[in-house]
Amino acid sequence: MIGHGVQIVTLLLMSGAAARPGRRRSSGFRQTFRDVRAGIAYTRGNRTVFWVIVLVLVMTVLGTPAVANFGPTWITTVVKVPVRNFGLVAATWGIGAFLASLTLARYASFERRGLVIAFGAVAFSLSFLVFAVGTVPTAVFGNFGLGASLAATNVSATALVQHLVPNEVRGRVMSILLVNRGLAQLVTLPLAAVGGLISLRTLFPALALVVLSLVTLIVVTQPSVRRARIVREQEAPP
């Protein structure tokens, strides 16, 4: 929270060097709300961008609080991994994310990012289901899949949205895409309350099935997400 506060202060101290000459720079809360409304309006009007953001939102807001925020509790209390060995299981998330990032960097020219997003979202849901079984092997393999699929989806969604959205509203739409991370932290509180009432062993499989159902529904019914691609401009002839 302190780190984000420092970032906000730093942004507020920036000068309006990018503003157009001769135009008065508009600022303040009213302008902020207008910018937010403009970003939401554009997102609602672009079917591909809208459903990509919804897909990432479902993954992050419903899945991440459980596997990331409650993951240590799940591994040490339900799976019964000793605390001294917890790092060996937790590291598989980072390994998966690292390998996925390297793969995307190696094949950065791959244009069908919508297909990567759809595959990553389904893989995340299935990995969550495996993770929720509650054994050491499933925790290891599930955690690896969660890290790899989440990294692949987030990187591809960010690249695709930046490519599809014009400069005028790109920052606003990207903010809407990334707001899911803050919402994921806020959702942790009610999920903790539910987990305290019905136990994590009941909550995790049920939540994994909900995420898998919603992700599958979006991927199947919204072909614009699967077909979305980054069209690269042809290089000018020498």
Image (tube, rainbow, N blue to C red):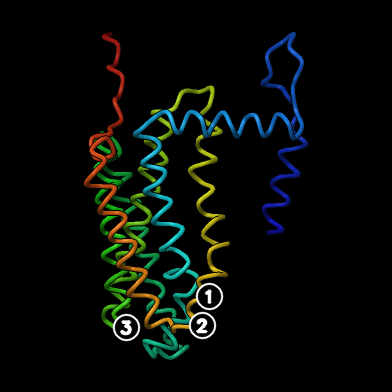
Residue 60 is situated, as x and y percent measured from the top left of the image, at: 44, 57
215 horizontally vs 8: left or right:
left
Name the residue at 28% across, 44% down: 106
Query: In the figure, residue 82 lies in which quadrant?
Result: bottom left
The mark lying in front, picked from 3 and 2, is: 2
Label 1 SS: helix
Residue 142 is situated, as x and y percent measured from the top left of the image, at: 30, 71
Report the quarter where the N terminus lies. bottom right
Report the quarter where the C terminus lies. top left
Front in this rendered view, residue 64 or 20 = 64
7 horizontally vs 65: left or right:
right
Contact flag, marks 1 and 2 (Cβ < 8 Å): yes
Label 3 SS: loop
Considering only order in the chain, which callout, 2 or 3, is on the residue closer to the N terminus? Answer: 3
Q: Mark 1 points at which residue?
A: 192
Name the residue at 32% across, 76% down: 132
- Reply above or below: 8 against 48: below
Q: Mark 2 points at which residue?
A: 196
Query: In the figure, residue 38 lies in which quadrant?
Result: top right
- Reply above or below: 129 against 196: above
User: Which amino acid type corresponds to the residue marked 3 in the rendered image?
Assistant: Gly
Contact flag, marks 3 and 2 (Cβ < 8 Å): no
Name the residue at 44% across, 70% down: 66
Q: Name the residue under label 3.
A: 134
- Reply above or below: 48 against 232: below
